[in-house]
Image (cartoon, rainbow, N blue to C red):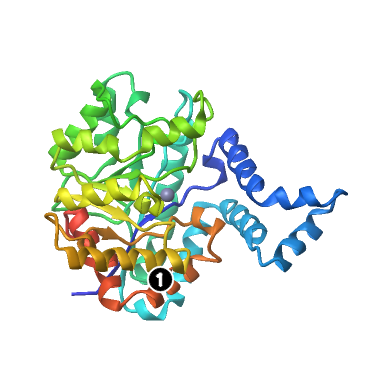
Amino acid sequence: MDKIFFDCHLHLFNIDHIPLSLQIQRVVKILNKILPITNFIPIPIPVSTLSRLLKLMGNKSFDHIINTCDVLELSPTDLIDRLVADLNKVKKIKDYKKILLPQIIDFEVSKPTEKLLNQIVDLKNALTKSQAKLVKNKIFIYPFLGIDPERFENNTQQAAFLNNYLNLDKSKIHFGDFIGIKLYPPLGFQIYPFTEKNEFLYKYCCDHDIPVTCHCCKGGFVNPNYKKPDKDGNKRTHPDNWAKVLEKYPKLRLNLAHFGNLKTGWLKPVIDLVKKYEHVYTDVSYNFDQNKKIKKIIRLVKQDHKKKSGKYSLEDKILFGTDFSVVLFSSDSYYDYVNNSLKMCSSQFFHKISGDNALRFLGRDL
Ligand SMILES: [Zn+2]
């Protein structure tokens, strides 16, 4: 059998699929982080000078922002071409079968669903267009469908949407089939308390054994319509909400994405849940962008090994992911993220998180 490399969490949306209000909010947040140095400069300075100044200070943020914007302007087909080129450069996984799970995000912060439907259609078209090239390079793509159940008038409508897009037959899979669900609480999805519509979705995913990936760390894209956007977004996203859901639906296949960003107050509840439930995982997307974070995760795995507590061991519950193209805010390229991850991890650990663990999470042969 082929050796497999999985990227369990990346995105192929582009600027057309993100509402303008969210784009502005994101840019303002990032600029606020890097611009305070301009307060020390009494006269307005041109952007090019500022960029050079930041570079001199060893700050790559400005280049990263410009690069991310450039990449977000690419069409989904061009994004795919970029990934193919970058993946082919990674020598250590040259002969591997590569499986990518792009996550559609339901970005809509108000009623219309046009942008979400466009995102789905654009991705499908890009996959059809690129299929021959991808398969030739042993790259296979199976997207996760973004959804906020409260958007539907009733569960009949929700079921029709799910049935229409998802591959529910585990014995048959075609290139480009949608095989999972992506949830994004800071934009509006309510994990808990239960509503008629979110419970319908949990039950549906359990009945059809469909894996779910949920954004699970502070920050990200936040619905600007909340009273206190950041605070409310974080509260809705916190893993404690999932503890309640899993009590009732312990069989749910769930990836708590981003490892709680390794932050206090988030990391422990995430680890507790992945160690308690057979089908609960966490991914390292946007966390293997810095060596100190990779080292911390390796340390956590070693500590867990020594303790031998809980039902499942942590190293069996971690999934490799990049969060491309969003991670370009912090990484130079997709190639860089993957190649550096391979360099920093033992081959045994890397193959676990980008191979066996992913197959177990998905619960199907690919
Ligand atoms: Zn993501």
Name the quadrant of the N terminus.
bottom left
- Say what amino acid the circle numbered 1 marks: Ser
The structure residue drawn at horizontal position 39% and vertical position 66%, both measured from the top left corner, is 294
Residue at figure coordinates x 44%, y 57% from the top left: 286
Task: Indicate the position of residue 14 as horizontal and vertical percent values.
Answer: 53, 48
Q: Is residue 18 visible?
A: yes
Location of mark 1 (residue)? 341
Q: Nearer the viewer, residue 34 or 332?
A: 34
Q: Residue furthest bottom?
A: 91
Residue 116 spot, x, y in % from top left: 44, 36
Which residue is at 54% across, 58% downward? 328
- Give the residue displayed 77% in from the left and 57% down from the top: 50
Tell me if residue 95 comes above or below residue 142 in the rendering: below
Direction from residue 317 to residue 127 in the image, left or right: right
The secondary structure type at the circle numbered 1 is helix
- Asked if residue 366 can be seen in this view, the reply is no
Judging depth in this view, the residue of 165 and 106 nearest the camera is 106
On the image, which quarter does residue 168 sit in?
top left
User: What x and y, as percent, mark residue 348?
Assistant: 25, 76
**Viewed as shown, does residue 29 lie left or right of 179?**
right
Q: Position of residue 182 (x, y in %)?
A: 34, 42
Q: Split into 4 quadrants, where in the image is the C terminus?
A: bottom left
Q: For this rendering, which residue is in front, 14 or 164?
A: 14
